[in-house]
């Protein structure tokens, strides 16, 4: 994620109007392990591999060009849109965009928007930055003030899982893995167990295979 977005110190003005614009067009909805787990559960799949074979997701290289990340595969016709977007007319006959994954299965990047996460691999901390969901997002700078601490309430676990995921990607950068290896060793797992168990198994397998010495409880340095 570019460094141009400002860090959120205390809070920010924002109120979503449900216009749905951030769910259409050239958006990259990047997913982490926990998002894959939630999406597979929402679709009643037993394995995240089905998200690939049924074409809900695809892999893209991140900006460092060293790791591959899953993202939602947008539909192309009649225009580009997220397959989980549904449009409905509200009581005022205005078209609203709703996310089928909301709230329990929604990807973290969507659930937190416009709060973006920038992971610092040196300190193991996540910095929260203000990322307008679209250039003209009508929700930005509305009068409603959101305290960052309130906004993040309820996402503690998901943020921790994401930090472990980002740390895994950091440690794998030097291994030059192929797309197939990423898909096979990081993004394909059964979803029948609680996520904590799945995470432990993923970590164990990655450590065995690539000696990255990852734990789910790596120390966090205060900045
Ligand atoms: S573009 Fe902004 S206002 Fe519209 S749905 Fe997305 S976050 Fe909400
Ligand atoms: S997952 Fe939901 S919120 Fe995210 S882009 Fe798709 S429809 Fe929009």
Image (tube, rainbow, N blue to C red):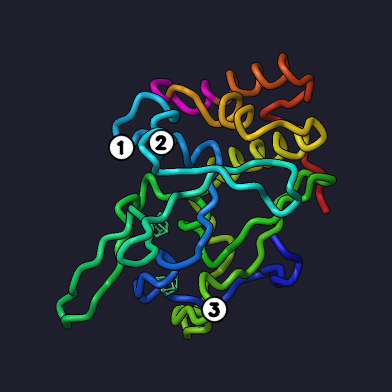
The stretch in magenta equals: 191-198
> Disc 1 vs disc 2: Cβ atoms closer than 8 Å?
yes
Q: In the rendered view, would you say 198 is above or below 137?
A: above
Q: Residue at x 73, y 48 (%)?
A: 65
Looking at the rendering, the quadrant in which ligand 1 lies is: bottom left
Q: Quadrant of residue 79?
A: bottom left
Confirm if mark 3 falls within 8 A of ligand 1.
Answer: no
Measured in 3D between alpha carbons, the distance from the residue under mark 1 to the one under mark 3, in whole angstroms, is: 31 Å
Residue 193 shown in magenta: yes
Q: In the rendered view, would you say 27 is above or below 182?
A: below
> Disc 1 vs disc 3: Cβ atoms closer than 8 Å?
no
Answer few, some or many: residues within 10 Å of disc 2's Cα (few below 14, many 20 plus, some between 14 and 19). many
Disc nearer the start of the sequence (1/3): 1
Measured in 3D between alpha carbons, the distance from the residue under mark 3 to the one under mark 2, in whole angstroms, is: 29 Å
Q: Quadrant of the N terminus?
A: bottom right
Measured in 3D between alpha carbons, the distance from the residue under mark 1 to the one under mark 2, in whole angstroms, is: 9 Å
Residue annotated with mark 1: 43
Residue annotated with mark 3: 135
Residue annotated with mark 2: 51
């Amino acid at each position: 994620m570019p460094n141009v977005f400002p860090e959120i110190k205390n809070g920010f003005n924002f109120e979503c109007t449900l216009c749905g614009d951030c769910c259409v067009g050239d958006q990259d909805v990047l997913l982490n392990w926990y998002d894959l787990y939630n999406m597979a559960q929402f679709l009643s799949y037993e394995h995240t591999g089905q998200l690939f074979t049924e074409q809900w997701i695809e892999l893209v290289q991140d900006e460092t060009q060293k790791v591959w990340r899953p993202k939602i595969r947008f539909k192309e016709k009649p225009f580009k849109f997220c397959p989980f977007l549904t449009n409905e007319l509200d009581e005022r006959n205005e078209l609203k965009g709703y996310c089928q994954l909301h709230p329990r299965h929604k990807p973290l990047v969507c659930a937190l928007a416009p709060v973006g996460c920038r992971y610092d691999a040196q300190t193991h901390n996540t910095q929260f930055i203000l990322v307008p969901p679209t250039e003209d997002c009508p929700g930005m700078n509305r009068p409603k003030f959101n305290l960052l601490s309130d906004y993040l309430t309820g996402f503690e676990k998901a943020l921790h899982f994401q930090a472990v995921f980002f740390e895994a990607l950091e440690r794998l950068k030097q291994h030059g893995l192929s797309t197939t290896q990423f898909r096979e060793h990081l993004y394909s797992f059964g979803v029948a167990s609680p996520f904590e168990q799945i995470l432990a198994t993923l970590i164990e397998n990655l450590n065995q295979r690539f000696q990255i010495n990852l734990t789910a409880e790596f120390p966090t340095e205060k900045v």
